[in-house]
Amino acid sequence: MSNYKFSVVIEKDSDGYFAFCPELQGCYTQGETYEEVIENIKDAIHLHVEDRIENGEVVPQVDSVSITLMEIAV
């Protein structure tokens, strides 16, 4: 068993929470609470990585992640 680290972006809106993993295209989920979306994205990443391994695909990894929130006036 191998351990992997992935970045996860979590956004909150009026419907709850949305989470995605930028390294794994198409790996996203939602939840009504923060705790629910965290569990859901863990499951989604696990399934995504298992599928990649079973298909002999590379599991992408990044060395570091930087994220910021910017306000832009237009």
Image (cartoon, grey):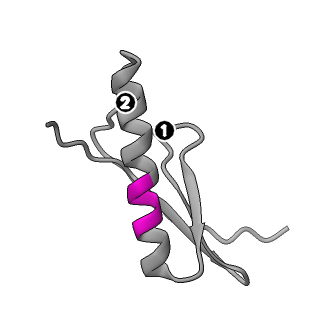
What percent of the width, then of the height, locates residue 56? 36, 15
What percent of the width, then of the height, locates residue 37? 49, 71
Number of labelled discs? 2
Q: Which residue is mark 2?
A: 60
What percent of the width, then of the height, locates residue 61? 32, 34
Q: Magenta stretch: residue 20 in it?
A: no
Q: Looking at the image, is 50 positioned above or below residue 15?
A: above
Marks 2 and 1 in Cβ contact (< 8 Å):
yes
**In the picture, which quadrant includes the N terminus?**
top left
Q: Earlier in the sequence, mark 2 or mark 1?
A: 1
Name the image quarter holding residue 54.
top left
As shown in the figure, which amino acid type bears the numbered disc 2? Pro
Name the image quarter holding residue 66.
bottom left
Question: Magenta segment, which residues?
Answer: 39-43
Q: How far apart are the two marked residues, 2 and 1, measured between alpha carbons?
A: 7 Å
As shown in the figure, which amino acid type bears the numbered disc 1? Leu
Question: Residue at the spot x=73%, y=68% of the render?
Answer: 72
